Image (tube, helix red, strand yellow):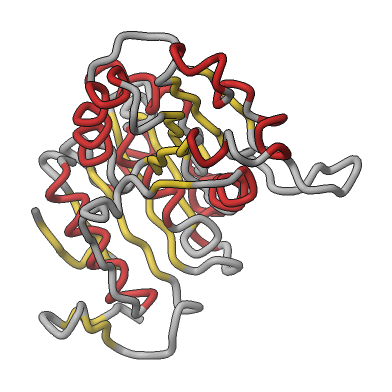
Amino acid sequence: YQRRVHGDIEISFDKMDKILRKKLLVLISFFILNTVLVAGLFDNRVLTPKLKSRDELMERVQSSDHISAVIFCRDSNTKCQQFEQIIYSFAEEIEGQAKVYVMDCEEVANQKVDLQAFQICSDEHAEQLPQLTFFAPPLTKINPYTKQPMQVQQIPYQGSADIKSLIAFARKNMNAYRVQLKTLEETKQFLQDKLIPWKIVLFTEKDETPGVFKGLTAEFRDRLEFAEVSKKQKEIIEYFGVTKFPTCLLYTSDAADDLLCVDLGGRRIIKKKK
C-alpha cells in the first residue's frame, strides 16, 4: 500500500482486497468528506436490518445507490432459520458493496396493503420461503424524457444458496457509476473538469469492473467522480507511468481547495505542486 506525490496525489494497490478497501474509505472520509465511518453489528444485526413494512423497504432501496438484497422470511419457518447464517455471512462479505435487509413476513401478513404488494408473505405461500430478491437502483436518477424519478428494478434471485453464488450474483447486477476512459484526450478532459474536483481513476487489467470498485462508486456517488482505464489503453497507461495492476489514483485539482498542503487524517501532509 503506497502513497506518493506524482503531480497530484496517487494511491496504488498491489491488491485491492477488503482491508485495503476499508483503508481507502477511511482515507477518503478524512481527506474529503470529514466524516466518520462507523461499522456495527446487526442488532447484533446492523448489517441485516429487519424491515416490517413495504414503505420501510421502498424507502431504503430507493434512497440507496447500492444494490439491495432483500430476504423475505418468517421467524417460525425452519428453512428461514437454516438460511439465516448464510445471509449474515453474505452480508459481512459484501459489506460496502451491497445492502442486505430481512423482510419480516409475519408483520407484512398482518398489513393488508403491504400484503397486496408482497403476496409471497401471505400465509398460503409460507412454505415457499425464504425468497431472495435484489433491488437494483437506476443508473440515472431522473428519466430524461418524463423528468420523473427512475424506479428500482426488482431482480429475483435464482441460484444456489451459498455465499459464493450470492456474491457473484450481487456483483454481476451492481451498477458501476464511472466512466471508461478510452483516449488520452478524454482522460485529460475528465481530470480537468471542475464540477466534482475529487476524482478516482482505477487502472485495471480485468475486463469487468471489480465489485469493490463498484461499491466505492456507489458509496461516494455525486461526491467523487470515478473513471476506469483498461490496461489495453497503452497511451493512457504510459502517460501516468502505471506499471502495476490494479492501481488506483486519487486526483485533486486546484478547485478542490486553496491549501498548499493536504492533511491525511492528521497522519501525513503531502504538499501539492503548483
Quarter placement of the C terminus:
bottom left
* Total numbered circles: 0
Residue for point 12% across, 80% down = 268
| 171 is higher (above) or lower (below) than 266 | above
Asked if one can make out residue 181 in the rendered structure from this viewpoint, the answer is no
Quadrant assignment, res 57: top right
Residue 44 placed where, x, y %? 21, 54
Q: Is residue 202 left or right of residue 89?
A: right
Q: Position of residue 76 (x, y in %)?
A: 34, 28
Q: Farthest residue to the bottom: give it.
A: 259
Front one among 167 and 248: 167
Viewer-nearest residue: 13 or 99:
99
Q: Position of residue 200 (x, y in %)?
A: 38, 54
Q: Quadrant of residue 140?
A: top right
Residue sticking out furthest to the top: 159
Name the residue: 39% across, 69% down.
252
Which residue in the rendered view is the most extreme toward the right? 146
Q: Position of residue 136 (x, y in %)?
A: 55, 34
- Residue depicted at x 54% and y 51%: 60
Is 137 above or below relative to 155? below
Quick check: 154 left or right of 39?
A: right
Left or right, 204 with respect to 255, comes to left
Along the line of sight, the residue nearer the viewer: 104 or 8: 104
Residue 208 visible somewhere in the drawing: yes
Residue placed at 52% from the left, 48% from the top? 65
Seen in the picture, residue 254 relative to 169 is either above or below; the reply is below
